[in-house]
Amino acid sequence: MRTPENILMHELIGLRCEVVASLNRSQTGISGSIVDETMKSIVIETAAGRKTVLKSGTIFRVSSGSWKADIDGSAILARSEDRIKKRISRW
């Protein structure tokens, strides 16, 4: 079960997501559902179409049900299948 404490060790695809802060100021405020994840980026399905956001230098707020968690994109800078396998210390 995904919780804010273990979200880094789970799949992010399907979660609601909002870009809270980004080095690219035009990406701040993008929100929608995560539809794909690569080693260096996350693809978010928005009302205006799909937006690709780089992980590095970005803070994502993900939510599922009643909880929300802020994730530093640098902490998930890996392919999802590799990130799920390794243990990640608390951020």
Image: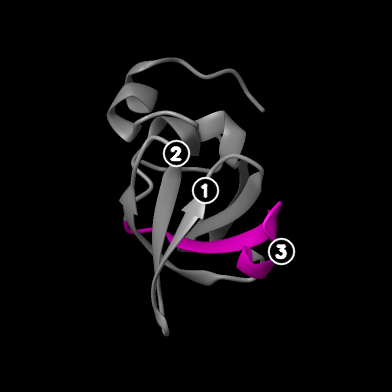
Read off the residue under disc 3. Answer: 25
In the image, is residue 22 part of the stretch drawn in magenta?
yes
The x and y percentages for residue 13 are 33, 52
Q: How far is disc 1 from disc 3 in space, using C-alphas?
A: 12 Å
Residue 46, numbered circle:
none
Q: 76 or 67: nearer the eye?
A: 76
Q: How many marks?
A: 3
Which badge, 1 or 3, is on the more N-terminal residue?
3
Q: Amino acid at mark 3?
A: Arg
Q: Report the magenta residues as a range.
A: 14-27
State the residue at coordinates (44%, 38%). 40
Q: Is residue 36 above or below residue 72?
A: below
Q: Which residue is disc 2 drawn over?
A: 40
What's the residue at 47%, 39% (across, down)?
7
Rendered image quadrant of residue 52: bottom left
Q: Which residue is mark 1?
A: 54
**Label 3: few (<14), some (14–19) or many (≥20) C-alpha neighbours in 10 Å:** few
Give coordinates of residue 35: x percent, y percent.
31, 60
- For residue 65, side relative to residue 89 (left or right): left
Q: Nearer the viewer, residue 46 or 61?
A: 46
Query: Element under label 2?
Result: loop
Residue 37, percent from left and from top: 35, 46
Image quadrant in which the C terminus is located: top right
**Alpha carbon distance from label 2 to label 1:** 6 Å
